[in-house]
Amino acid sequence: MSAPMKIDLPHILRDKDRHGNERLYYRRRKGDKKIRLREDPGTQAFLAEYDRARARSLKVSGPRAQPTLKGSFRELCLDYFDSAEFRRLAKSTRKARQRILESCLDEPIHPDATVTYSDFPVHRLDVQAITVLRDRKQSLREAANGRVKALRVLFNWAIQKGRAQINVAKQVEKFGGTSDGYHTWTEAEFAQYRATHPIGTKPRLAFELLYHVGCRRSDVVRLGRPHISNGWIRFTSYKGRNRKPIKVEQPMSTKLEAVIAASETGDMTFLQTEYGRAFSAEGFGNRFKAWCEKAGLPHCSAHGVRKGRATIEAENGATPHQLMAWFGWLDLKEAETYTKKAERRKLAASMVEVPTFLENGPHLEKGAMKSNG
């Protein structure tokens, strides 16, 4: 029996009838009615049928079947999901962005209202309306900021298509906060991990690739011998590859070269599962988390290695543009985050040489700083 055709579309369900024939359905979420798809997968007729099923599914709001209103927020989202711009995004990005925007559609306009944002006219979606959507997730800062980001992208697309005049979501600030996201590894934590996982093991190989290359988990699972030539590592960053591809080029570290030589690796990818296959980014992230826990570092993650390495390089005097070249950043602000933190630490450390200032606070006698400098 031939393997079922892979269909790169969300919300597709497979089933078999009593004769063993495969049937395909569309179901947006658990509890919704399944919509049968009868056309042959891979054909334009199938894509058209899929789009009709998706539109039909989104027209239902809870138990009340309502048509999609002309000029509504729901209509804008549906058209965006059907656009060429949306389909060019990576599958994981499409899935995440669609989930966020659909959650906005389901939000009631007021806490006690039965009317949701889905039927809200686009021209009435002002700063206050977007702020409400953000604030509904204020207890989850990243989720709140994710809504703002997705809505900014949606309105950028709407402006390009003549569906909106201004991007009101850009006027809504993202939540700040004390959280820096993933924990940044310290040098002591680097040493602790290395002490637990010796050279020659898969956990150590994974760590050294992350550390020396400074790449994301979506890149480390794809790195292999084809990316090394003439003493250099060259690869295109997986993130943003469809919109703004970033080519990363680095001289090969002799320390990393030694670790690779001492480790069991694959040819196409250095890291492989126990079945001899490349890791998925998600699967690798989970496995690396387990390796961190074994080393007594349950708060550490793969992405934090990259942040830790960037911190070390900034503290050793790397410039923002050097960090951008090494870590594949396009935005100068991201690199400056690390250099500014490093500069603040140097300034704080320099104050140890001025004990009078630290002891006396702002009530200094004239010339006190100079006499202790």
Image (spheres, rainbow, N blue to C red):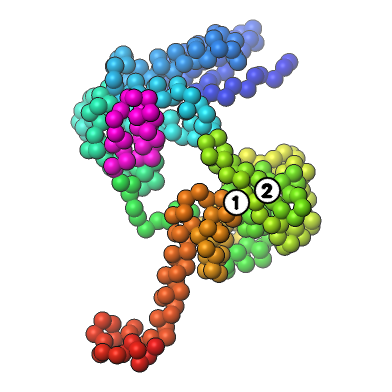
To which quarter of the image does residue 130 belong? top left
Q: Which residues are magenta?
A: 147-172
Q: Nearer the viewer, residue 17 or 229?
A: 229
Residue that mark 2 sits on = 234
- On screen, residue 293 above or below 16: below
- Residue 112: give x, y in percent of width and height: 20, 31
- Write the residue at 46% across / 59% down: 336
Is 159 inside the magenta-drawn segment? Answer: yes
Is 161 inside the magenta-drawn segment? Answer: yes
* Quadrant that contains the C terminus: bottom left
- Write the residue at 26% across / 87% down: 364
To which quarter of the image does residue 118 belong? top left
Residue 147 visible to the viewer: no
- On screen, residue 87 above or below 18: below
- Label 2 CA crowd tier, 10 Å (few <14, some 14–19, many 20+): some
User: Mark 1: which amino acid?
Assistant: Cys
Q: Nearer the viewer, residue 174 or 201?
A: 174
User: Mark 2: which amino acid?
Assistant: Arg
- Write the residue at 43% across / 30% down: 98
Residue that mark 1 sits on = 215
> CA gap, disc 2 to disc 1?
12 Å
The answer to whether 339 appears left or right of 169 in the picture is right
- Residue 134: give x, y in percent of width and height: 30, 40
The answer to whether 34 appears left or right of 213 in the picture is left
Mark 1: secondary structure: loop
Q: Main secondary structure of the magenta part?
A: helix
